[in-house]
Each structure stands twice: as structure tokens, then as C-alpha cells.
Image (tube, helix red, strand yellow):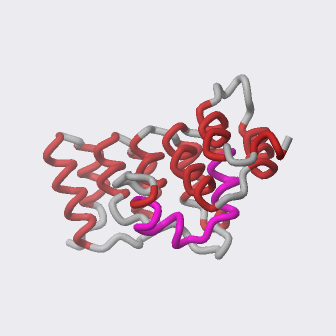
Amino acid sequence: MREVVEGKEKEVVEVLARAEPMALGQRRRRELMDALVTSPDALLRAVVLGARWGSRGVLESAIRRCTREAVDGDALRKAMFTSYTPLEMAIHNHHRECWEFLLRDWAWPDGRGVATRRALRVAVESGEDDCLRRLLARRDADSEQIDDALESAAGIGRVSAVELLLALVPS
């Protein structure tokens, strides 16, 4: 099987990430990813496509084998021609299982949580109040990020998001 995949890892990632959930469960996707995909480029692609298409199995397999800098930094966005981080992509596309996974500190090989930079704003704009609560509970957003998310929430009329964000502002 490995010989069939040789040189076609990116295509394998695409198929695994986009497969219908009923046709191929998340556990099986993770197992196939572990067995078939090993190149660094294909793993980065797996992180992006897993977050974009809501395939936690693909995402989990790839993150376990990538460095934080590759997944969380500018290298990923440049390599994959996207301005979103995987977390922002999962939030934007309403893939709760993926963003919940990405926010778990233990999911990462170094035990540190994912950087949340612009994720507050993405959660506000996508209407993901549960995600916004989780991000705010982490207490790692600076005042500039909160102000940016608050401005966005007010601008698009997201009252619940405004209330959540204002709760953090000191009286």
C-alpha cells in the first residue's frame, strides 16, 4: 500500500480530509494518515485541510507529527497560501470538533496551547459564542485583540458577543 501512495501524499490528504463522515470515520482517517502520510509538506497540508473540512482525525494525526512553528506560525500560512491559522479556519467553518481539539493544550506535542491571535475576531464574525467563551476563558488575549473583536461584534450587531467581551473590560 505504501508504494501506491509514494509521491501522492498530498492527494491522499485531500481525500482523507474531504471524505464523507459516514463513509470514513475520524478514527479510521487518523489511522490512514498515520500509515500513509509522512512528508512535512503533506503534513502541513493535512493540518490546513483537516481544519478547513472538519476532519479531526486528519488534523489530529498531522498535529502530533508537526512542530509548533510549522503549524502555528507564518510558515504554514505562506506554504498553504492562506491568511488563516488552522484554529481560525476551524472556527470560521464552524467545525466545533476541530476547534475544540486545537484549543486543548494536551493535543500539542509540547503541551502548550495553540496561539489564538485573531481567533477572537473570527469567533465573533462566525457567530461561535461557545468558542468565544472558550477563547476568553484562556485569558491570553491582549487588550488590542479584545478591542478589535469588540469593534467587529458591535459593527455587525452581535449583541451576545459584545456582552461576553465587555465582561472582560475592567470597570
44 up-or-down from 14: above or below: below
Q: Residue at point 40% right, 62% down?
A: 136
**At x 75% / y 43%, what residue is drawn?**
5
In the rendered view, tell whether residue 158 sits above or below residue 65: above
Give the vertical position of 133 relative to 171 (above or below).
Answer: above
| 84 on left or right of 102 | left
> Residue 34, image x and y in percent?
78, 52
Would you identify the image quadrant in which residue 141 lies? bottom left
- Count the numbered circles shown: 0
Which picture quadrant has residue 64? bottom right
- In the image, farthest residue toward the right: 1
Q: Percent position (x, y) of residue 35?
A: 81, 50
Front one among 171 and 114? 114
- Quadrant of the snapshot with the C terminus: bottom left
Task: Indicate whether residue 65 is drawn in magenta.
Answer: yes
Q: Magenta: predominant secondary structure element?
A: helix
**Residue at 30% over, 66% down:** 168
Query: Does residue 166 appear to the left or right of 59 in the view shown?
Result: left
Quadrant of the frame with the N terminus: top right
**Which is nearer the eye, 98 or 72?**
72
Q: Is residue 145 magenta?
A: no
Query: x and y percent of residue 164 in the render?
Result: 31, 54
